[in-house]
Every structure is written in structure tokens, then in C-alpha cells.
Image (cartoon, rainbow, N blue to C red):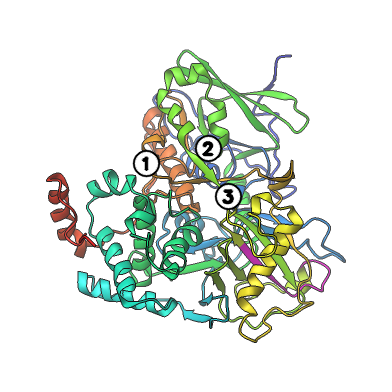
Amino acid sequence: MNPRKFSRRTVLRGTTMAGVAVALGSTPARAASGGLRVAVLGGGMAGLTAAHELIERGFEVTVYESTALGGKARTIPMPGTGTMGRADLPGEHGFRFFPGFYHNVPDTMSRIPLPGKGKSVSDNLVSLNGALISRSGGRSDIELALPTNPATRPLDPDSLRDTIIGLVQEVVSLPPQEVALFADRLLVFMTSSRERRENQWENVAFWDFMRAAGRSKEYQVALVRFMTRGLVALKEKVANTRTVGAMGEAFILAFLGLGTNGQSPARMLNGPTTEAWIDPWVRCLADLGVRFAVGQTVRSLELSGGRISSAVVTDPTGTPAQVAADWFVCAVPVERARQLWSPAILGQAPELAGMNELHTDWMNGVQFPLRETPPIKAGTQLFLDSPWEITSVLDSTLWDRDIPAQYGDGAARDILSLDVSDWDTPGILYGKPARECTIEEVLAECWAQVCDALNDTGRSVLPDGIRHSSFLDPAIRESGGGLTNDTPLFVNTVGSYRYRPESATSIPNLFLAGDYVRTDINLATMEGANESGRQAVNALLDAAGATGGRVPVQTLYQPPELEPLKRIDAARYAAGQPNLFDLPG
């Protein structure tokens, strides 16, 4: 049976909220060719960003989303937990963290209005008050204060090295030579030229770059392993140094007050993500004229005359429909996008074949509603010794919500929200990796690992009976004696950049937006997805010959003080010599 036509008159208007009115009409951008209709395939961070920029430039935009708007960033209610008019308890794919070096996402937030004169979603960002470094085995926990407006410090190599050493010594106890080694290796990266980063460090595993083999377990676990698995959800022995090093550099500069545009180095939302961000965003886009078709899964792209002529989507019953548009922005995750590349599409856009070489991994959320607020002051908790590389936030330290009055059955007074970054290392209860556990075992294991860190020094931070309930991201499902994951995360492995596509493709009306697309931030993050959405719109504007202004794309801060050393390094790299600070031994 031929799929039905999906016209602009029959498009669904589903959103994350019921009853959003879709406003039509905007001032069209002038386009030299191709028309103004754009189908955005995917309603996650990249797709919503692209829709936002396109609608502001006068295009007619429809977003097709299979599950729910917001993608991995959305809140996932815990079904059936709300009673007596309270909302269901809020779950998350993972808590939302906004480092100070994010610029594109905050810019988008600043253009999403909230009730109240001059207010926007960016006003829902609050500074993280501190971090608890929680160790296991009876070692004392450390509370780190996070500066809200840090003073800048010198960036000459000696001062930078001393700063890194000081930060490390606050967190771990290591032999001086290993602390110095860690600082020296980061200094090598931070003074490396663009050419060396792209051509040498892209092809070196972070484990090898940090010379972790043969070092102490504390060096390997608390520094090298945590910097990859805990901060950026990568594995230290396969993650490329270019990506991990750039993120480490960005964090260090942010905490020195550099590259943050005067903002706090670490911020989070003051409520559940969908309430504080996604719902207002969808309302804003609908008011601007964006149409939403939620529950529509893209199945294939049709090629005719060298262009994409239509997309075929199916509704939850499997009924197909044909989507016609002048331009197509593919904003679905990498593992779904590459399923759309037919032999005909790959024949015209052979660069897309490299996407089959890209890898995904797991980073998903677990929430523990609590019957009382534990004695934890710091907003985020880092469990350096947890085999599953768990980090968490205590929602009461950030939210301006009355949790028992607004959510659940009134008995849950707080929520401990976890990110689980390592699904391949055996746990402490069952001796199995998370992938091989049942859902109940995952929940029990996560609770045990958190308690192992918080309750090991004689204090009962999480006493018996404090746990109200538990919730695992429903993308994780039991199947055949193990678990499957519907929402894996793109990961930057050694040499993966060469296989990642640009936003513009060799098919003139097909553009890509997603955290796997080549971006400056070069990591699967909200910022990377947002940046890719902006890139896709700029590529579309170029192809359409549109006269509207291009979308600004902000890149990571590069301190001018280090530029002379980077120029020296560029010459040394061209001559086949190592970085000035890259000493043997």
C-alpha cells in the first residue's frame, strides 16, 4: 500500500504538552531556489535548535519526532506516582549540567521567553554551589566549593602547571611525581597546535597519552578513568586524546574564569528539565509557527533527480505516511540516521558510509526519590571509586520546587538523580557489569555503590528507610538475559573524526544535525547537538541562496596567552618534533 500524503494541513500538532496551539505565518526569507518548506526529522536538542533558527528566518518548519520532544534532554515522568493532584515524580535520562564554556545552548535559552518582564529560560539556570568528592573504603569525603565568578589567573606555563597541581591535590592523594605527571601531560595538550591535535592526538588513546600504564591505581582510577568516564562518558583506553584533552582544557579554563563570558563555571536547572526548558521552548516554537508531528518515526528517504523528494514516516500503529518538503534536516541519532542511507543515497553521498565506523556507548540515568533530605550540602556528588562511574545531583540543592507538595504521593521529599557512565565493569553486589544485570539488579547495585561511598566513614548519610522508590531510564530494557538501550550515546574513539560527516552533504537538500556531526566542541553533549543544528541551518541557507542572516556559532575559548607556544608547536609538528613540554620518561 502506498503511504498516505502528509500534508501541511493534516500534520499532527502533538507536543510535550497537551493543547499547544500552532501559530502559522512568519516573514519568509528570500531564497534563490528550492522553496521554503523544511522537514526536520527528529525533535531532540539538534532538531529543536534547527527548527528555532529556521523559523526565525522565515522558513516553514515541521518537526517529526518518534517519541517525545526534547530527546535525551527531556524529563521522563515516573508513571503512576502522582496522587491527589500532584504530578508524577520526575525522572531523567540523565541530569542536565551546563559548564561555563557552553555558549550556544545558553544563547538559545536566552531567546525562549518566560512569563515576567524580560525573563527567559536562561533565568532558570542556577550556579552549582559545590561538589562532593565521595570516596569509598573509609576515606574521607571532600567538599569542593565552586566559584560563581572566579578571578582570572596567569596562564604562563609555570602558573598553569601549578594551578593544575593544586586542583589535583585538593581531590586525591598521590605521590608528587604522579601529580606532576598529570599536570605536565595536560600542559602538553594545552600548548599543542591545532595541527597536532587534529593529526596526532586524535589518533592516540587518552590512557596512552596520560602514560597511565604502570602508574598507581589511584592515578589510573581517580584521575585518568574519572576524567574520561565520569566527566565525558568515554572509555580511557579507546577515547581519543583530542576530545578528552579539549574537554579537560575547557573545564580548567572555566574554573579559572576564562571562556565563560562572565558566567558561573558550572550551572544547572532550577527544576525538572521539561518544565524548566523543553515545555517553554516548544511553546515558543509553536507561537513562531513551527508545526510538530509527534509519534512519527522516519523510516526512509526517497531520492529523485539527485535530491531528497520525500521521507516516509510511520505512526505508532505502523501506518506509513509520505512527507514532502523542499529541504530535509536529518536530526535523529547516529545509530538511526545510518539506517536511512539506502544504496542510492550512499551512491550520491559516499561520505555518509563512514558513519558505519562510528561507535555508541551507554550513559543513562537512575533516580532515587528519598523520604527525607540527606545531610549533603554540595549540589553534585562524584563517586570516584564506584565501578560504574556514578555521579549524582541532589535536587533540593538546585530546585525551587516544593517536591512533596508538587510531585508523587507526598512522601518523597527529595530526589537523588544519578548518571551511570560505565555499564561494562563488574559491580560490588552481583559481580556483573550493568549490561548483564536485570533492572532490579541495576537499581540495587547503584544504591549499594552510592551508599558504599557516602556511608563508609561512620556517618549514615543514606540511612535504612530513606529510599522511597527508584526509577531507571525506560530506554533500558530487559532482553535475553541482559539489557538493551534504545538511546545510546555517540562516543569519540581513536581516529573517529575522519568518519564523522559535516552538516552539509553531497545531496543538495539534505543536511545533518546531531552530536555525531563534526563540531568545534567535538563531544556528544547538548552543546554539540545545538552547535550542529546551527551548522545545518547555515548550510541550508547557503544552499537556498537565502538572504537572511547566518546563525552565529560560538566555539570553545582559546586563550591568547598560549598562542605563541602553539605557533612554536605547529612548526615543531611540521618538522616531526614533539611538543616542547612532551618530555620522555
Q: Is residue 531 above or below residue 183?
A: above
User: Magenta segment: does it hold 413?
Assistant: yes
Question: In the rendering, at what x and y percent does residue 150 appear?
Answer: 37, 77
Question: In the rendering, at what x and y percent does residue 63 appear?
Answer: 60, 37
Query: Residue at 67% of width from left, 81% of height from top?
Result: 461
Query: Residue at 40% of width from left, 35% of height from top?
Result: 499
In the orientation shown, which residue stands out farthest toward the front? 214
Q: Is residue 400 at least partly visible in the picture?
A: no
Q: What's under tag 3, amino acid-wise?
A: Trp
Q: Which residue is mark 3?
A: 362
Question: In the rendering, at what x and y percent does residue 81 appear?
Answer: 82, 61
Q: Residue 158 vs residue 321: left or right?
A: left
Q: Which residue is mark 1?
A: 495
Q: Quadrant of the N terminus?
A: top right
**Residue 334: mark:** 2
Q: Residues within 10 Å of mark 2 (few under 14, many from 20)?
A: many
Q: Which residues are magenta?
A: 407-418
State yes or no: discs 1 and 2 in contact (Cβ < 8 Å): no
Q: Residues within 10 Å of mark 1 (few under 14, many from 20)?
A: many
Q: What's under tag 1, amino acid-wise?
A: Gly
